[in-house]
Amino acid sequence: MSIFSKFPRTFWVANTIELFERWAWYGFFMLFANYLTGSSDMGGLEFSQSQKGLIMGIGTAILYFLPVLTGAIADRYGYKKVLALAFVIYASAFALFPQVSSFAAVFAMYIYLALGAALFKPVISATVAKTTRPETSSIGFGLFYMMVNIGAFFGPLVTLLFKSQSHLIFYVSCGIILLNFILLLFYQEPERAEAKRGQPLLLAFGEIFRNMASIFKDVKFIVFLLIVAGFWSMYYQLFFTLPVFISQWVDTGVLYRFFDVHIPLISASYSPAPGVLDAEFITNMDALFIIIFQIMVSTLVMRWKPLRSMVAGFLVCSIGMSLTLASQNVLFTIAAIFIFALGEMAGSPKVTEYIGLTAPKDKKALYMGYSFIPVFVGNILAGFLSGNVYQAMSDKVAITERFIADKGLLIESGLSTNARFEEVARQVSLSPQELTGLLWDAYHPSGMWVVILSVGVVAAGCLFVYDRVGKRE
């Protein structure tokens, strides 16, 4: 316990702030894809999958690009002020989200929310770095990432309780963020370099872009980042695609019945309809698996070289994520999520470690600062995969429209997505469940798994070649 006494108060305040911020973020983000595309009678906006892909892909990419600039803002004006601004933007965005419903307005609101997250990210990470010493940094960042995963797990479990009234999802996240204003009273400003405090912001931005230009001259480093972007494009299907796929295609009845008998509180709390479990509850198993197994997996791959661990992790991840889209059996889906989580735990942490090990000694901080590039590029690709590709291959709404055209059915306009599907089922004398099975067999929406697997295998293969070429050099 003596190691914990070496952390100052601000370290613990920052970690608690991180816990609540991740709680609020994932409580909304895990449900966002189905909110955008879901049926209006369930509180959804009925956007197309392509529209969803644009909003989530580009918006989240911007979130990961901006911290390179917002970090300079925090250095110039102070961490505490920037945190307060981030919380104001967060809270106002969550409060205003239920008031907008057009594509342009929702897109703009998400980018506004992403700005709040981008202001927050570099400040809280820098605070943890500045409140740890060489002998405490390992356990310090371990505690920090534990807070991330706890928030990511419990956030959706709380907001799902209010899913029947979708506007409450945003208000719950808003309320969680407001708690951080109380914690901010106990936050003590870490020391900042005098030069950064007095540096004009435009000069700081100019320096940032000059550094970025120098980074792009390192071809080997850029190739590595682009390969890793393939991993992130696959990883974000966990949020962009999987909740929608489960909601549209997966039969969760067997799991619902298990909980209804053994843990009725779960079946009562996380069921949008009788015999059905919330898709996000299933997807959230990834965070649970990480909480349980991260230390075990980290211990296993600790002695592996980073590139070896990344190749194995990317390959396992691609198998797991692709298999989540291959079956209507919910138990198969959960097993696939577990496989995906194992790959994520083995590969994801090693990316940062590899950059730290291979960056030039006089530019380590600079290179680490630009490790956002693969996440930025990966989100844009993830948005395309979960948008245009999913809509063309796997979207139940689009497939139903093809079925209507193939059968020459006449369906009343103005119906919600769910009501339209039920009317199609009635006209062909099938139950909605039977019609879902018919569409699955006839139109093969599970084919999306091949695309995801291909992306992951190509990324792992390229990384393997990159490793071999690097060793020869």
Image: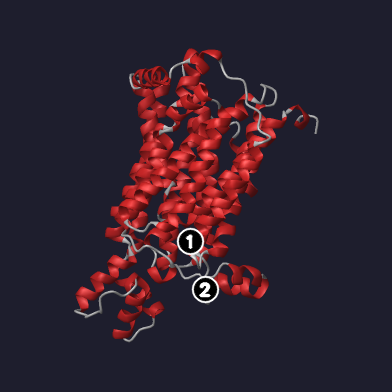
Q: Nearer the viewer, residue 286 or 338?
A: 286
| Cβ–Cβ under 8 Å for marks 2 and 1 | no
State the residue at coordinates (54%, 52%): 173
**Looking at the picture, how far across and down is residue 222, in whole percent?**
36, 26
The residue where tag 1 is placed is: 167
Q: Nearer the viewer, residue 284 or 221?
A: 284
Q: Is residue 135 visible?
A: yes
The quarter of the displayed image where residue 373 is located: top left
Q: Amino acid at mark 2?
A: Gly
Element assignment for label 1: helix
Q: CA distance from mark 2 to mark 1?
A: 27 Å
Element assignment for label 2: helix
State the residue at coordinates (38%, 38%): 62
The residue where tag 2 is placed is: 253
Q: Quadrant of the N terminus?
A: top right
Q: Is residue 464 visible?
A: no
**Looking at the picture, how far across and down is residue 297, in whole percent?**
61, 42
